[in-house]
Image (cartoon, rainbow, N blue to C red):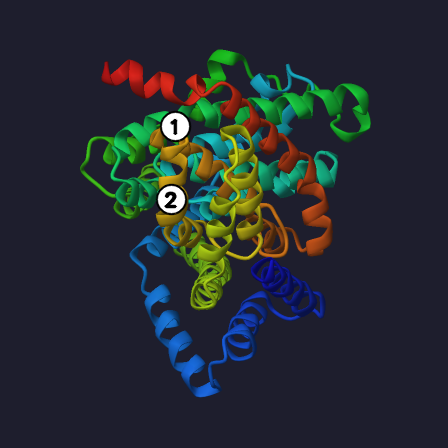
Amino acid sequence: METVLIAAGVIGLIFLVLGLGTWVFAGLVAVALGSLVWLGDFNLDRAGVILSRILFRAGNSWELSAIPLFILMGELIFRSDISDRLFRGLEPWAQKVPGGILHTNVFGCAIFAAVSGSSAATTATIGKITTSELSRRGYDRNLSIGSLAGAGSLGLLIPPSIVMIVYGVQAEVSISQLFMAGVIPGLLIALLYSGYIVTVALSRPDKAPRRLTSDVSILSSLALLAPVIILILLVMGSIYSGIATPSEAAAVGVAATLVLLALERQLSWSLFKESLASTVLNSTMVCSILVAAALLSTAMGYLHLPRELAGYIASLELSPALLLVALALFYIMLGLFLDGISITVMSLPITLPIVIQAGFDPIWFGVFLVIMVELGQITPPVGFNLFVLQGLTGERIGRVAWSAIPFFVLMCLAAAIVSIYPGIVLWLPNYLSG
């Protein structure tokens, strides 16, 4: 119980610091430092040395290199007419469904997730393209932001996924099977999001005006979408063929985008310079939050909070169903103040043996864990997607978080569905490997 109270105190401190208007990076660093000094009985000098080392190590993480590269790819697309063609190509498909081009948020994120492996990069890239266009066309602001917050988290579930790679290494299971296992649940969540948008559009037409403005035929739309399809095939092909890692594939995507723009005579020094400048701003925002989260994760590790919380759950000796509920609550709690990789690394040595002993498949649990981590991406106070969208839209964090609540609930529903019907997760890897 003392551990639970300490965890609640840390969460409350984060709310307080961020509620005072402190920069997210500075606020998380302050909480990490304060937690070590006041709760961990570290002196200030020792705590500073520990955090400075983690700051350097996290800032030099190879995984982070994919984020600015994919953001640059999105910036180049955004400033060329490729983004306009993307909307004109998707519009004849989307406008036939209640909710209109709001569905491009969901399936745009799902498609980009298949080439990025990063939730933050997916949210930032698709959000950069869609937020202004949806606002200009009169779509409800909350629905636009919320659908982006939820769908952007698909970057962790739809392969390739950095969190899945970390889980596969720790759990000693096939990473390729994990990738296959994430496909159908990812599509399920995307369909739930689109279904919610359809429901809102039918009940409140003012929130998603259905204006049939496109005169582009379905066949012509494929030609308009061709540049994006080519880029996706190049990036996906380089990853799935084993030629490139996600970070290297991001470089392939940037290079392919530059070549495509050059061939279409759209590449100019001013376009490249503006894209680069915006990339620096956006990627600095995203990466600084990730680095600050690594500091907070380290502080939580020194306080032994994840391990003690997991141990407390194990001591309850719950049935398999109640165990899953307890683990879900446990991971949602961790997601309030830790990043996905830290959650996986710090909790898995305790939770995985418990899960396997209860009879759950480790491949299935990997997907369940990623869904729990996705929930943390849209849960305040430290929901990375919320802060990415705050930076993109200029809205207050409270409004962004409120807009994401329906999509948080839908993701909880998806977690319940895959728990009741585990075959949704296991069918594809079993079919392809069998």
In the picture, residue 149 is in which quadrant? top right
- At x 33%, y 38%, the residue is 260
Residue 381's disc is none
Tell me the distance, in whole angstroms, between the alpha carbons under discs 2 and 1: 23 Å
At label 1, the amino acid type is Gly
Name the quadrant of the C terminus: top left
How far across and how far down the image is residue 304, in percent?
45, 63
**2 or 1: tag closer to the N-terminus:** 2
In front of the other: 293 or 271: 293
Which quadrant: the N terminus?
Answer: bottom right
Q: Are marks 2 and 1 in contact (CB under 8 Å)?
A: no
> Residue 359 has which mark?
1
Q: Can residue 395 be seen? A: no
Q: Dot 1, crowdedness within 10 Å: few (<14), some or many (≥20)? A: few
SS label for mark 1? loop
Residue linked to disc 2: 163
* Local secondary structure at mark 2: helix
Q: Residues within 10 Å of mark 2 (few under 14, many from 20)?
A: many
Q: Position of residue 54 (x, y in %)?
A: 37, 70
Asked if residue 341 can be seen in this view, the reply is: yes
Give the image location of residue 47, x and y in percent. 44, 80
Q: Position of residue 366 (x, y in %)?
A: 39, 35
Depth check: give the residue in front, 136 or 341. Answer: 341
Image quadrant of residue 367?
A: top left
Residue type at tag 2: Val
Lateral position of residue 216 relative to residue 429, left or right: right
- The correct choice, above or below, for 225 with respect to 399 in the image is above
Total label count? 2
Question: Residue at 39% of width from left, 71% of height from top?
Answer: 55
Q: Of residues 148 and 354, which is closer to you in this image? A: 354
